[in-house]
Image (tube, rainbow, N blue to C red):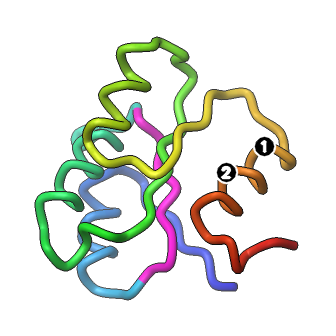
Amino acid sequence: MDVDSATDGAAAWEMIQDKKYDLVLSDWNMKPVSGFELLKRCRDDPRFVKLPLILITAEAKMENIMAAKAAGANGYIVKPFNQAVLKQKIAAVLPSYVR
C-alpha cells in the first residue's frame, strides 16, 4: 500500500487531481484549505464524488459530525484514536481492506 501526505487541504487537492487514490484521510483543521473544504471540493467534482474520504478531528461537536455526513464524508474519527478505531473506520469504507 502506498501512502502520501500533504501539508494542507490545498496540497491534498492538487495530489488528488494528479493521482488515483483509494482513500483519503484528512484532518479537519488545516489552513488555508480545511479538510472539510477538501471534502466539499471532492463531492462537487464528478471525478471524485465517490472517492472515500474520512475526516479526522479533535472536535467531537455533533454539528461538525452532522455537517461532515451531510457533505458526504464516509467517516469521522475523533482524536485521540487508536489503531483499532482506524482499522474499523477504514474497513467500513473499504471492506476489502481487512487486515
Q: Is residue 66 above or below residue 83?
A: above
Residue drawn at x 83%, y 40% is 82
Q: Are marks 2 and 1 in contact (CB under 8 Å)?
A: yes
Where, by quadrant of the figure, is residue 43 drawn? bottom left
- Left or right relative to 75: residue 36: left
- Left or right relative to 36: residue 20: right
What SS does tag 2 mark?
helix
x, y percent for residue 41:
17, 56
What SS does tag 1 mark?
helix
Q: Which residues are magenta?
A: 21-28
Residue type indicated by callout 1: Val
Q: Which residue is mark 1?
A: 85
**Residue 29 or 43: which is nearer the viewer?**
43
Where, by quadrant of the figure, is residue 30 drawn? top left
Residue drawn at x 69%, y 85% is 1
Return the mark for residue 60. Answer: none
x, y percent for residue 81:
76, 34
Q: Which residue is mark 2?
A: 89
Q: Is residue 37 above or below residue 81?
A: below
